[in-house]
Amino acid sequence: MATNNHYKILTGIGFVVLMGVAATRRLSSPEVSYPEHFRAWAHVKTGVIEKNNPAFSHWGGFHHIYANDKAMEGYGSGNFPDGSVIVFDVLEAVEKDNYLAEGPRRIVDVMEKDAVRYAATGGWGFEEFKGNSKTERLVRDSAVTACYNCHTARKTKDFVFSSYRE
């Protein structure tokens, strides 16, 4: 009888541990991959965020937007299919002798579309990589507050702010 109770206790503990692991996995977002060779993709547009812009402290400088083939379909139709990846490449703006040039990379923001994996954030996964690092992630599990909450303003545009410049 003691063996049977011992088995029930161990089974109960195992179940609680397993449920804790499952709950932790549900709360954390699936990782967005660093988009290798994104600069060879279609160039969507370029902009410059200047010092008086409220977004300057984080996104100040040049920002180039790139899109893979799937995302280019989405720019055309307004509905981005799964597999779409959009990159927001942010570089410091360096001014010298009345010339504005690209400086060091600040961040690489990535949006990756997968309606199943990222169902909690409108079908999009979000990540931000620091500088030239392909591994130093700045968003991680804060995608809802760091990215998605702002992107909901563009829900009718499939959560995408940019538009393709012909």
Image (cartoon, grey):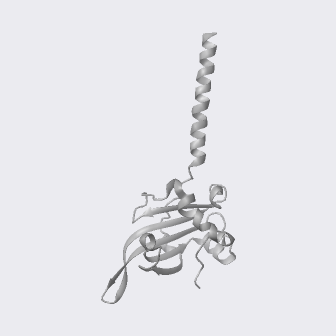
Looking at the image, which is closer to me, 78 or 61?
A: 61
Looking at the image, which is closer to me, 126 or 57?
A: 57
Looking at the image, which is closer to me, 59 or 90?
A: 59
View extreme (top): residue: 1
Give the side of residue 149 with respect to residue 55, left or right: right
User: Residue 22 at x, y = what percent?
Assistant: 60, 40
Name above or below for residue 124 compared with residue 74.
Answer: above
Q: Quadrant of residue 15?
A: top right
* Residue drawn at 59 percent across, 63 percent down: 149
Give the side of residue 24 with respect to residue 129, left or right: right
Q: Disc count in the image?
A: 0
Q: Quadrant of residue 101?
A: bottom left
Q: Quadrant of the C terminus?
A: bottom right
User: Residue 63 at x, y = what percent?
Assistant: 47, 76
User: Residue 8 at x, y = what percent?
Assistant: 63, 20
User: Residue 70 at x, y = what percent?
Assistant: 62, 69
Looking at the image, which is closer to me, 69 or 26?
A: 26
* Residue drawn at 45 percent across, 72 percent down: 59
View extreme (bottom): residue: 98
* Residue drawn at 55 percent across, 61 percent down: 126
Give the side of residue 87 with respect to residue 130, left or right: right
Name above or below for residue 49 compared with residue 14.
Answer: below
Q: Quadrant of residue 25?
A: top right
Q: Quadrant of the N terminus?
A: top right
